[in-house]
Structure formats: structure tokens, C-alpha cells
Image (cartoon, rainbow, N blue to C red):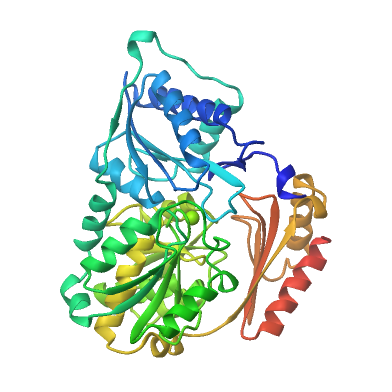
């Protein structure tokens, strides 16, 4: 399926569609209205308060304006924080004691896309049942537009980045990081992380070389923070005198990828592992949460600290938080570079991730390349197939059932798609929540073996 034919994707992660086709101001107004009506029904408040932000992609302002229209027309009061990182929306919900948040973002998707994500009053991505209720209200247009005199008001707050940065600073060892006098190259892809990313690093005493640091919303490169899209960051880090590392944020700044001081991409799986290592050092051990598609490295690192464990969850931020929060976990996240640091917010946060990695560098006093070399290493293979090419959504469940039957004697999890654990590796097959694709991810000691696991799984699935 070409992306221009993609349907509006409605899932636990919210709504995503192609701008001007399936994602329009009409959709955004109805989604805002559905969320507003949902909040009124569930909070029992006449005027719930909602924080609204947008990720800075150039198609965002009309969609955000429409969503604000939908919210205020159901009687919600809106705090408009403007262009903001997705985690900043989470922080500002707590700051304003709001009842929920809405952000206009399509995360790392290419510029043709945009979307809407809702957060609850704790700044959490709503759990699947609640997310479904909001989506159902939207689909059925169950929106109770309010009386004219009850229309909500809009208040603007331009301090969001500052509030978010301050909260990160209160929860890391600022003195140690400042003493490290790090030079850091930052690639913000001209997205919402530009202002807060730079502010944080400067407050941490870093000399910052900022590339794609203008919040124009016109991405400087293909936005997903993968090795092939970070060539400029690698070159800039290699070329910067004495750089400690290079950081890449995705457009809504919830994910972070890292290159070491030699300009080598260390792999997005390492972000969570490095941040987790620092938190394990700091606390002496504790509970971590990660999704089923995340590398085994985090288990290996946790195993070095007595009493630590890794809670494995379905893919998606809400699921990770649902594992992390009741366990009083010290850190959670996903292998795509998304780190959830509970003292700051319940949203994956590139700022917290940067600060924890710098804290690790400061305390270890070694170059990043050496710290990475000391981590257990696996090869990971991530493949994607167009949903249409495998027979559409209807073909997914039978394919999963075939995989389960084929590997009935191995360790299986069907919490999300199906994951099969072998003695020397694992493979995870699932349909994406946010794109019309099926993902197959495998990890093993060598790339050849990981490739083989993908292939074995694909064949068993008959796709
Ligand atoms: Mg993102």
C-alpha cells in the first residue's frame, strides 16, 4: 500500500493519517470533541482542563487549532502550550493539574503524516480500554457539543520547555555533569526538541553544536532516528573537537538515538540500556520495564544488580507504563530509543535520556565508545512488510496462530503478536499500531542467526 492510500490509523497510540487525505481539520475537530466529551463524562467536571501541544511539523497549526475548537466546543478549557515535545505535554499536565492532554504529532513518520495523541490526567498514554473508548466515541461521533454559554476558554502558556527542563535538572546530578564540561552535538531534525534540547544541554554546562536546530517543522532529513538518517550527525560529531557524543531526537522528541565520540552510531537499542545502567548504579537495583521487542541487553545489565528485574510488556508506551508504575520501577522504555523516567513524566522523554547518559559519562569518566564496548552485544534484525502485501489485517491473526503452532515447544509470549524465545535468540512478529505494516524483529549472537530467525518465523507464519 502506498502511503498516500493509507487509511486513518486508529489505535492505542491515537490517530495517524495522511495530511489533507485522512488527517484533516475536520478529523482533528471531531477527535478533540470526542476527547472533550470523554473527559466530561469520566471526570464529572463541567469544564475539564486540557493541555494542548503540537510537534512542530509544518502541517500542525491548522490541526491543533481544529482540535482546540473541538475541545472548547465541548466545554473544556484549553491550555495551549504551542510547539512542544510530546513528553513536555505530559509534564505540563501535572504542572497545571489538568485533566488531560492532547498533542498533534505523527512522531517519526515522514512529513506527509500527522496525528493526534491523548494523555490522561496523570500524563499517561491511556491504557488500551480507555484509548478504545476515545476512538469509539470519535468513530461514532458521540460528541456532546456544549451550550453556547458553556464554551471553554483558551489560555496560552509559553513556559513549557523551561518547566520541563527544570524538572529534568531536579532529578539528575547536575554538578557532576557540569564538571564533565562535555561537548555535545545535537540533531533536533528541526522538530519540537530544538528549544528544550538545547536549553537542557546548556544548563548542564555542555558546549552544544546544534544541527537541524531551527524549529521550522521542515525536517532536515528523514526523521526516524536510524543510522541511515543520521549521517550528518555522525560527521559533525567526528568533526567536533573533543565531542563526547552526538544525540538525535525525533520530531516530537520522545525518542533519542546516540553516536559515540568517534561518530559511530551505537544503535537505538543502547539508549535505554545506558540510561538503565545509570539508574541501576544510582539506586543499587530495582525494577525496569521494557516492551517485548526490546533487546536482551537490558536484562543482562539488570542481572548485574542484585534484586533487579525487567518487566516485559506489549509494545506501546501505555503498556510499558502499565508494567512500570505499579512495580515502582526506576526506569522504563522501548528499544527504539524511548526512555521513561518516572520522576519527570510517564512519557518517553529524550531530555531525560540525554541527561542520564551524560550522568553516566560523568560518573564513569570513560569515553562512550568504551562504555558501549563493555555492554553485551547482540545482532538485531528488524524487518517490516506492508500489511497489504501479507493479505491485510484479517491475515494477521491466522499468521500468528501458525507461528504459535509451529513453535509450541519453545518459550512463547502472546501478550502482543507472538514472541518466541530460543536458547540463542528470540523473534517477535506483530502488526504495527501506527503504520499499515507487520514487523518481524529478531535478536541473536550473530546477524546471520537473527536473519535466520526472522526467516524461520516468516515462513512459519506463511507471510
Ligand atoms: Mg516520537
Quadrant of the image containing the C terminus: bottom right
Relative to the observer, which residue lies in front, 77 or 304?
A: 77
Q: Is residue 53 left or right of residue 447?
A: left
Total marks placed: 0
Residue shown at 35% from the left, 76% from the top: 277
In this view, 119 is above or below 400: above
Residue shown at 65% from the left, 50% from the top: 435
Q: Is residue 291 left or right of residue 207?
A: right
**Residue 369 in picture, x, y percent from top left:** 42, 88
**Residue 73 in picture, x, y percent from top left:** 42, 19
Residue 296 seen in render: yes
Q: Is residue 338 left or right of residue 424?
A: left
Residue 260 seen in render: no
Residue shown at 63% from the left, 82% from the top: 424
**Residue 439 in picture, x, y percent from top left:** 68, 61
**Residue 408 in picture, x, y percent from top left:** 73, 66
Relative to the observer, which residue lies in front, 47 or 247?
A: 247
Residue shown at 34% from the left, 69% from the top: 354
In this view, 139 is above or below 8: above
- Dividing the picture into quadrants, the one containing residue 118 is top left
Relative to the observer, which residue lies in front, 160 or 91?
A: 160
Amino acid at each position: 500500500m502506498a502511503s498516500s492510500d493509507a487509511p486513518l490509523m486508529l489505535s492505542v497510540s491515537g490517530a495517524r493519517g495522511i495530511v489533507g487525505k485522512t488527517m484533516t481539520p475536520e478529523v482533528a475537530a471531531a477527535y478533540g470533541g470526542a476527547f472533550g466529551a470523554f473527559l466530561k463524562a469520566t471526570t464529572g467536571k463541567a469544564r475539564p482542563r486540557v493541555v494542548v501541544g503540537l510537534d512542530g511539523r509544518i502541517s500542525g497549526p491548522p490541526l491543533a487549532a481544529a482540535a482546540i475548537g473541538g475541545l472548547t466546543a465541548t466545554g473544556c478549557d484549553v491550555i495551549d502550550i504551542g510547539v512542544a515535545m510530546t513528553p513536555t505535554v505530559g509534564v505540563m499536565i501535572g504542572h497545571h493539574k489538568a485533566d488531560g492532554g492532547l498533542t498533534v504529532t505523527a512522531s517519526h513518520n515522514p512529513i506527509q503524516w500527522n496525528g493526534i495523541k491523548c494523555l490522561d490526567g496523570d500524563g499517561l498514554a491511556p491504557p488500551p480500554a480507555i484509548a478504545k473508548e476515545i476512538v469509539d466515541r470519535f468513530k461514532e461521533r458521540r460528541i456532546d457539543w456544549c451550550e453556547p454559554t458553556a464554551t471553554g476558554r483558551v489560555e496560552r502558556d509559553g513556559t513549557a520547555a523551561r518547566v520541563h527542563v527544570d524538572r529534568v535538572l531536579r532529578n539528575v546530578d547536575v554538578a557532576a555533569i557540569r564538571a564533565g564540561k562535555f561537548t555535545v552535538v545535537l540533531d533536533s531534525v528541526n522538530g519540537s526538541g530544538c528549544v528544550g534540547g538545547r536549553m537542557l544541554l546548556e544548563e548542564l554546562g555542555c558546549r552544544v553544536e546544534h544541527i537541524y536546530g531551527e524549529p521550522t517543522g521542515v525536517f532536515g532529513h528523514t526523521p526516524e532516528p536510524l543510522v541511515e538518517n543520521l549521517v550528518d550527525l555522525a560527521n559533525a560529531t567526528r568533526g567536533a573537537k573533543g565531542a563526547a557524543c552526538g544525540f538525535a531526537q525525533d520530531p516530537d522528541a520522545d525518542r533519542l538515538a546516540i553516536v559515540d565520540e568517534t561518530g559511530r552510531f551505537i544503535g537505538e537499542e543502547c539508549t535505554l540500556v545506558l540510561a538503565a545502567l545509570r539508574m541501576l548504579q544510582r539506586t543499587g537495583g530495582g525494577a525496569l520495564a521494557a516492551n517485548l521487542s526490546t533487546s536482551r541487553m537490558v536484562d543482562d545489565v539488570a542481572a548485574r544488580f542484585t534484586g533487579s528485574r525487567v518487566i516485559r510488556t506489549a509494545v506501546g508506551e501505555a503498556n510499558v507504563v502499565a508494567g512500570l508504575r505499579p512495580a515502582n520501577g526506576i526506569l522504563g522504555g522501548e528499544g527504539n530509543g524511548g526512555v521513561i523516567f518516572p520522576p519527570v513524566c510517564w512519557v518517553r522523554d529524550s531530555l531525560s535520556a540525554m541527561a542520564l547518559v551524560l550522568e553516566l559519562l560523568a560518573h564513569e569518566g570513560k569515553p562512550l565508545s568504551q562504555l558501549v564496548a563493555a555492554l553485551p552485544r547482540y545482532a538485531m534484525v528488524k524487518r517490516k512488510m506492508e500489511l497489504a502485501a501479507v493479505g491485510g489485517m484479517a491475515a494477521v491473526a491466522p499468521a500468528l496462530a501458525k507461528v504459535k503452532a509451529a513453535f509450541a515447544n519453545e518459550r512463547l509470549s502472546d501478550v502482543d503478536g507472538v514472541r518466541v524465545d530460543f536458547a540463542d535468540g528470540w523473534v517477535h512478529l506483530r502488526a504495527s499500531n501506527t503504520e499499515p505494516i507487520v514487523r518481524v524483529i529478531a535478536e541473536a549472537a550473530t546477524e546471520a542467526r537473527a536473519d535466520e530467525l526472522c526467516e524461520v518465523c516468516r515462513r512459519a507464519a506463511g507471510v
